[in-house]
Amino acid sequence: MSSLLSIARTGSAAILLSPLRSSVTVMAVIAVLVPYLVGIGLVEGLRQESRIAIGAGTPAEKELLPDLYVAANQFGRRVPIPLELAEPIRKFDGVTRVIPRIVGRITLGKENVEAVLVGMPREELQRRGSSIQRLTRLIDGQLPRSQHGEAPQLVIGSGLARKLDNLQVGTVIPPIFRSGGGEKTPRITGIFQSEISPWQSQMILTTFESAAEIFDQRGLATDLLVFCRQGQPEAIRSRILQSLTGSSTKAAASHQPSVTSRTDLESLLPAGLGHREGVFNLLFVIAFAIGILVILVTSGFGRPERRREIGILKATGWQTDEILIRSLVESLLLGLISAAVAILVALAWLKWFNGFWIAGIFLAGVETQPAIAVPYVLAAQPAGLAVLVACLLVTTGSAYSTWRTAVTPPAEAMR
């Protein structure tokens, strides 16, 4: 036992005796581990945020979001759904509410900043305790009340407001549409906190009537949000498909219904995020292989001193297996140091630098310097894997060169 402790102490001292080689080895491992930890942290953060967005979280969150999303297809392509199809769905037993929604892209400002305009019925926006009022955190102003024929009232995200020359409540922005009803000038009536969620970073909220005029698509909606009583979404989904598919009305005959449940959305999360995570893991495997080669090269720093050191140890009675154990202890310590520093750097990158640059790889439309609080979850499992990988990298990269020197006669090693 005392001999093993002596070997361990000598192994830890070897790190101080070879500062250049140790520093280069640690930096090489950190360069491999930090992007991996940051990437995995972003993927897990997005997965958690996505589950909250589709209502897969707590029961309180599920109550705020619809159970079914009804859309229309033509020739296998998504198209707007006629509003007249909402009426028969409202009459189904078990349906509590049917809310039409319009979602579309617009451009604003001289820089043509892209934003997503969401239109919801005026009565839904003003209804006390509605999901919109509870999910949209107003910083200033009020929710829109514009009706058909009036100038559109918009509620804009705080991040988007800063991009557009610090728009304030009451600001009139240039016309963003020209429809059959003439040109109207939108007005900002409220600003909501958009930094809390990536899905709200580029969003503008208005009434359904104003959105229909902006896109010049009256009588149509992007989809219908259907709220059901507990335990009945699947039965209502089947009834919607059967009823609308077999309907004799002109609107139903020309539009093939498409119904997506919350369960369907939950099943899509692993597929979408898993694809990015899989690609990222593949790149990490390649980086892992390259990392071993890098450690092999970096172990050459200070090689003459290393050879003389091992030669002296052999001349003083150290055996080859003792030298290998000493090298193993040194490698494990370097691996632990590298992993600890990599975890701290990854946390700083995600928390203090808000995923600078790398967030754009995982979030479409996010700038180099994200304007939102980038979601991340750096769990114990990837951190533990980073420790294992760091120790394995250093050990694999230095074991061969140490063994080659350890089997060399002392006189030749000390030349």
Image (cartoon, rainbow, N blue to C red):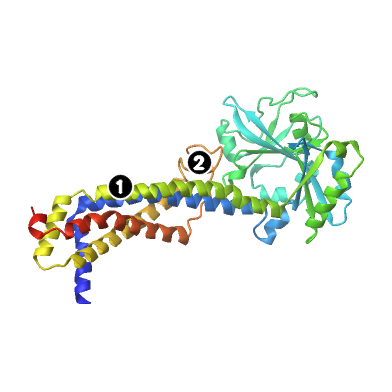
Calculate the distance from the C-alpha at mark 2 to the C-alpha at mark 1. 26 Å
Return the residue found at the far bottom.
1
Q: Which residue is mark 1?
A: 294
| Rendering quarter of residue 402 | bottom left
Residue 361, labelled with which disc?
A: 2
Label 1 SS: helix
Q: Looking at the picture, how far across and down is residue 62, in whole percent? A: 70, 57
Q: Position of residue 250 (x, y in %)?
A: 90, 36
Is residue 364 found left or right of 252 in the rendered image?
left
Task: Give the amino acid at mark 2.
Answer: Ile
Residue 374 appears in the rendering: no
Residue 300 visible? The answer is: yes
**Label 1 is placed on what type of residue?**
Val
Q: Depth check: give the residue in front, 397 or 210.
A: 397
Residue 179's tag is: none
Label 2 or label 1, whichever lies nearer to me, is 1
**Is 29 positioned to the left or the right of 124 in the image?**
left
Instruction: Tell me: 64 left or right of 248.
Output: left
For the view shown, which residue lies furthest in the right direction? 248
Q: Residue at x 33, y 55 (%)?
A: 393
Q: Position of residue 245 (x, y in %)?
A: 85, 44
For the point 20% across and 48% down, the residue is 301
